[in-house]
Image (cartoon, helix red, strand yellow):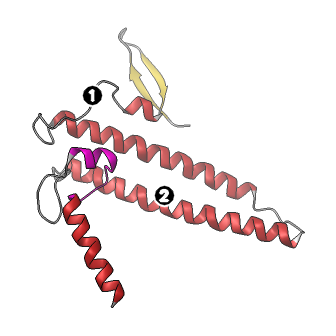
Amino acid sequence: MAGYEKSTSTGTTERAEMKAENFLPDDYRPAEDEPFMNDRQLEYFRRKLTAWKHELLEQSAETLEGLAESARSVPDIADRASEETDRALELRTRDRQRKLVSKIEVALRRIDNGEYGYCEVTGEPISLRRLDARPIATMTLEAQERHERRERVHRDD
């Protein structure tokens, strides 16, 4: 597992494991009564996104290890079919995780260039509750609902 360097109060450096709890501050939650997307909020979301990305990459590595181990030849046709079904499910899950990591990277770039937390469509702030629940959100709830209604209409055509 990957780690990172951490300075201690004595000035020495320790090696620490990268786990989600290392990234998320226990004592801070963004609040509506503070300036929107201030430095603390941006750091909170950066850490949340980074922890999520790390967790997904760790799960992906485990999935790849599992797929490599299950790549053996199974003589029984029913067992082979079952194993192939499991493998296809794992690959679909891996693909969803890959797409999610890509969206997380986009959100991190939006933090870096000052666009994070604002709707791509309207330019209005996305609610902190929405961002906390779905930190990769790029639209306000209203804009997202309009977008989904339009998609449904075009899909029905």
Q: Looking at the picture, tell me which residue is in the foreground, 130 or 74.
A: 130
Q: Is residue 80 magenta?
A: no
**Mark closer to the observer (1, 2):** 1
Label 1: element kind: loop
Q: Which one is in front, 41 or 71?
A: 41
Quarter of the image containing the C terminus? Answer: bottom left
At x 85%, y 66%, the residue is 74
Residue at the (35%, 40%) spot, across then down: 48
**Residue count near mark 2 (Cα–Cα under 10 Å), binned few <14, some 14–19, many ≥20:** some
Q: Considering only vertical position in the picture, is 4 above or below 143? A: above
Q: Quadrant of the N terminus?
A: top right
Task: State yes or no: residue 139 in magenta.
Answer: yes
Q: Report, in whole angstroms, how far the alpha carbon at label 1 lies from the one at label 2.
A: 28 Å
Q: Residue 58 sits in which quadrant?
A: top right
Q: In the current view of this chain or complex, which residue is farthest to the bottom?
A: 157
Identify the residue at image location x=23%, y=53%: 110
Give the residue number, with chain letter if any, for mark 2: 97
Q: Amino acid at mark 1?
A: Tyr
Image position, residue 76 (x, y; %): 89, 69
Residue 152 position by quadrant: bottom left
* Residue bounds of the magenta highlight: 128-140
User: Left or right of 157: which side holds 70?
Assistant: right
Amino acid beneath label 2: Gln
Q: Which residue is mark 1?
A: 28
Which element is circle 2 on? helix
Residue 144 image point, x, y percent: 25, 65
